[in-house]
Amino acid sequence: MSARRIVNILNKPRKTLIAYLCVGDPHPSETLALAKAAIAGGADILELGVPFSDPSADGKAIVRASERALAHGTNVDTALGIAKQLRSESAVPIVIFGYYNPLLVYGEERFVKNANDAGVDAILCVDLPFDEPANLRESAREAGISMVPLVAPTTTDARLDALKRHAESQLVDFVYYVSVAGVTGAASIDAVAASARARQVLKILDIPTVVGFGVDSAEKARAAANGVSGVVVGSALVTAIEGAPDAKARILAAEKLVSSLRHGLDA
C-alpha cells in the first residue's frame, strides 16, 4: 500500500510543484539523474511519462521526446524500473503518466501490481475517462494507488458533479486542471483565468487541484497556483532538457528551470 505520500505533500502550506519527465529521453540511462535534478530544484512530486507513439494530448516538445525515448526501446517496464530505483533513494511521490493503450497491452492488473511494487503513488491515464469501465481503476484502488483525473476548461459543472460522485468510491488524491483546451506546451496561457477556473473546480470537487499545460515561468506558476494547490511543469522542462548539449548540461538545465519555478511559487 502507498504511504499516501501525495496527501502529505498537499497538506503542506507551500504550493506543490509537480515536474514531468518523459522516461527515456534523451536516453533511459539519463532519466534517473534528471529526476534527481528536478527534486534538487524543488519538485515536490515527480510525474514519469511512459512514451507513446500517438500522444494525442501532448504538444511538439513531448512528441519529440517520446520519439527519442521509443527509439531507445523505452517502455512500461523501463518507467517502472526507474520509479523503483528512485523510490529506493527518495520519498518524493511518484506519478506514472501514460496513455491507456500501452497499459492495456501490458495488462492492467499486472501494471498496477508492478507499479505498487515499485513504490508508485498515483497513475494518470490521460485518455481514460473517469466513468469508463476499466480494471485499472479498481486494481489501483485495491492497491492504494491514487488515480488522477484530468479536468479541462470545457468540462461542465454537471460533469464535475459526476466526477465528484465517482471520486467518493475511488482513491483520488488530487485533480489535474488543464489550463487550455489543447495540447501540452501552449505558448501562451492566461494563468490568471486558469487559476480562476481551477478554483471553481476545487470548490465543486473539494479535492486538491493543480494547474498544468503552459506553465513555463515563475510568473505563470505563481499566477496559476493562486488559490489552488500548485502547478505542473512538463513541456518547458522537456524543452530545457532537449536544448542542452550534453548529459551534464541537461542535469543543470533541469534543476535550474525547476528551481526558478519553485522560487516563483514561494515568493
Image (tube, helix red, strand yellow):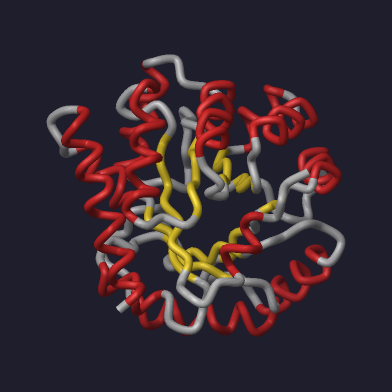
Query: Measuring 78% from the left and 49% from the top, which residue is drawn there?
Result: 132
Name which quarter of the figure residue 94 lies in. top right
The quarter of the picture where the C terminus appears is: bottom left
* 116 on left or right of 85: right
Nearer to us in this view, 84 or 73: 84
For the image, the number of numbered tags is 0
Q: Position of residue 61 (x, y in %)?
A: 30, 42
Q: Position of residue 107 (x, y in %)?
A: 74, 25
Q: Which residue extends farthest left?
A: 245
* 158 on left or right of 48: right
Give the answer, above or below, for where 100 lies relative to 215: above
Name which quarter of the figure residue 25 lies in. top left
Q: Position of residue 183 (x, y in %)?
A: 41, 53
The quarter of the picture where the N terminus appears is: top right
Query: Measuring 56% from the left and 33% from the top, which residue is drawn there?
Result: 88
Give the answer, above or below, for where 210 lies relative to 109: below
Give the answer, above or below, for where 249 lies relative to 182: above
* 9 on left or right of 32: right
Query: Measuring 27% from the left and 48% from the top, which residue is drawn there?
Result: 255
* 189 on left or right of 89: left
Name which quarter of the figure residue 66 lies in. top left
Query: Measuring 39% from the left and 22% from the top, which residue is drawn there?
Result: 28
Give the answer, above or below, for where 226 lies relative to 252: below
Nearer to us in this view, 82 or 64: 82
